[in-house]
Amino acid sequence: EMDKTIYEDDNIKKKFYFCMIDGSHALCGAGSLIRKIDNQLIDFTPYILKSLESMEIGVN
């Protein structure tokens, strides 16, 4: 139900969710991959995937 409240935006076309887990710690998030900007669909998938691939959890 909460997602419906957060993503009540007609410009959002595709959402993603992720969790990076390191032992008992986790970093989770969500966002949109495709947005409509100036009547064009812009796909942010390559940028999001590259960002996620470069992330590390450094918990000590």
Image (spheres, rainbow, N blue to C red):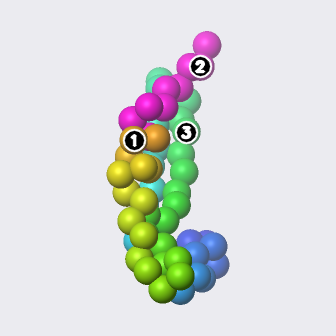
The C terminus, quarter of image: top right
**Dot 1 amino acid type:** Lys
Is 34 a magenta residue? no
Q: Which mark is residue 59?
A: 2
Instruction: Give the vertical position of 6 relative to 55 (above or below).
Output: below
Judging by the rendered image, the residue that carries numbered circle 1 is: 50
Q: What kind of residue is marked 3? A: Leu
User: From the viewer's perspective, is the residue at label 1 or at label 2 nearer?
Assistant: 1
Question: Residue placed at 44% from the left, 40% from the top?
Answer: 52
Query: Mark 1 or 2 closer to N-term?
Result: 1
Vertical placement of 2 versus 50: above or below?
A: below
Can residue 1 be seen here?
A: no
Q: Is residue 54 a member of the stretch shown in magenta?
A: yes
Q: Is residue 44 visible?
A: yes
Question: What secondary structure is marked by label 1?
Answer: helix
Nearest to N terminus: mark 3 or mark 2? 3
**Numbered disc 3: secondary structure:** strand
Q: Residues within 10 Å of mark 3 (few under 14, many from 20)?
A: few
- Tell me which secondary structure the magenta stretch mostly adopts: loop
Residue at (52%, 77%) from the top-left corner? 37
Residue at x 41%, y 77% (from the top left corner): 41
Q: Quadrant of residue 17?
A: bottom left
Q: What stretch is highlighted in magenta?
A: 52-60
Q: Which of marks 3 and 1 is nearer the N terminus?
A: 3
Looking at this view, name the residue that lies furthest to the top. 60
Residue under label 3: 27
